[in-house]
Image (cartoon, grey):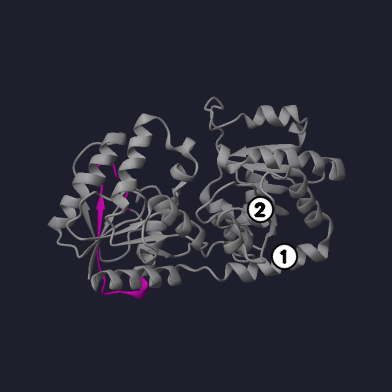
């Protein structure tokens, strides 16, 4: 069986699609050493680092940019799939070609532009969403990240239920409560982190809903003062786009700026330490296909507060404290409960650690391989 992968995101390991592709190929190579795999990469690809053994690479010609991406997905990739005589073409993100010379498997990580239309962008963005939505119906099988995401795909794309399979993501082995702890002190110093703090990964678009957490922190501040500052990670946007409401300004309006520490971009290798150092991790997102950060935090032994939305009840089980989306007072109560009640905190840590073990890349790869085999029988 020969699988040809769309490698548009291979050189972007910090992108969700790039991370997914890398973990999938590495794990497939371990569990199916005889599987024939070809990675088809675009002309802009800057790196083939960390490529698994015995994976062939084919370089496409063409151009970069948005138009180049569409041409790669719809023309260059299918042409090269034919050239390498692959049995299955696997596109590991939501951009299948309208026509494929091989059986087509598509991984749709989420359908955010359909669930939240403001994320479709302008005219060009809406046209692209329409293109990939139409092309999704040509897939022999679709992989996704959760049962909640599967339900959305069926609802918004009209795909048959038996042609959509959830295969969960997993935290990397570096996300562990003890392994790697020797780096924690250096990471604390590098980012000038306080002794105790509440952590949130600061992707600042509307969907990530940081405003709910900031409002919740007005209640936290009344009870805890400056004992537990809020640490936000991530590069800040220009704050001019409507999708990126000005969180700096909002923190000023709430008069909590002194309690918020903006530490900017965090190197990926530092993230396990950052989770371990945090007293509580908060995930206020409004919509997710999976929500990998909550699994990473649980795997590091950090108690999690998150909104009860889309896939998160399915993912966290009893391993996190879930609150009503948009309810800042309830979120504050959950944070304060974990800060002030050691027994509750310890119980949630243990439940989170246990829950995180349900997710592993070996299982994801095995389930993906089973889909390949099913598709080959069609």
Please, is residue 299 above or below residue 64 in the view? Answer: below
Residue lying furthest right in this view?
223
Q: Label 1 neighbourhood size at 10 Å, few (<14), some (14-19), many (20+)?
A: many
Magenta stretch bounds: 29-48
**Residue marked by disc 1:** 348
In reply to whether residue 61 is colored magenta, the answer given is no
Rendering coords of residue 159 (x, y %): 36, 57
Please, is residue 119 above or below residue 291 in the view? Answer: above
Q: Which mark is residue 148?
A: none
Residue 213: image quadrant is top right
Give the mark, 2 or 1, whose residue is nearer the N terminus.
2
**Residue marked by disc 2:** 306
In reply to whether residue 47 is colored magenta, the answer given is yes
Residue at disc 2, secondary structure: strand
Rendering coords of residue 73 (x, y %): 26, 46
Rendering coords of residue 77 (x, y %): 22, 50
Q: Label 2 neighbourhood size at 10 Å, few (<14), some (14-19), many (20+)?
A: many
């Amino acid at each position: 069986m020969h699988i040809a992968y769309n490698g548009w995101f291979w050189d972007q390991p910090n992108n969700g699609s790039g991370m997914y592709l890398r973990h999938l190929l590495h794990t497939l190579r371990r569990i199916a050493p005889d599987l024939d795999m070809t990675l088809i990469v675009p002309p802009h690809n800057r790196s083939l680092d960390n490529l698994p053994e015995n994976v062939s690479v084919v370089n496409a010609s063409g151009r970069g940019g948005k138009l180049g991406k569409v041409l790669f997905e719809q023309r260059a990739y299918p042409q090269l799939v034919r050239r390498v005589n692959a049995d299955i073409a696997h596109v590991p993100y939501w951009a299948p070609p309208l026509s494929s010379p091989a059986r087509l498997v598509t991984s749709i990580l989420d359908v955010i532009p359909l669930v939240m239309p403001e994320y479709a962008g302008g005219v060009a963005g809406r046209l692209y969403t329409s293109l990939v939505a139409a092309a999704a119906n040509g897939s022999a099988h679709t992989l996704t990240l959760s049962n909640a995401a599967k339900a959305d795909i069926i609802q918004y794309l009209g795909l048959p239920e038996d042609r959509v399979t959830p295969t969960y993501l997993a935290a990397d082995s570096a996300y562990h409560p003890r392994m790697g702890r020797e780096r924690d002190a250096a990471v604390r110093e590098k980012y000038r982190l306080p002794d105790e703090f509440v952590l949130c990964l600061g992707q600042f678009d509307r969907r990530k809903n940081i405003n709910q957490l900031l409002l919740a922190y007005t209640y936290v501040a009344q009870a805890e003062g400056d004992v537990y500052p809020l640490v936000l990670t991530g590069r800040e946007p220009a704050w001019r786009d409507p999708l990126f409401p000005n969180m700096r300004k909002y923190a000023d309006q709430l008069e909590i700026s002194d309690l918020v520490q903006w530490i900017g971009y965090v190197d990926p290798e530092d993230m396990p330490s950052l989770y371990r150092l945090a007293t509580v991790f908060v995930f206020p997102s409004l919509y997710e296909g999976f929500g990998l950060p909550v699994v990473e935090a649980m795997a590091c032994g950090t108690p999690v507060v998150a909104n009860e939305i889309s896939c998160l009840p399915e993912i966290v089980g009893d391993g996190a404290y879930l609150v009503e989306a948009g309810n800042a007072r309830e979120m504050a109560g959950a944070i304060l409960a974990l800060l002030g009640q050691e027994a509750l905190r310890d119980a949630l840590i243990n439940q989170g650690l246990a829950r995180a073990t349900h997710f592993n890349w070996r299982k994801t790869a095995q389930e993906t391989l089973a889909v390949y085999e099913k598709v080959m029988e069609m």
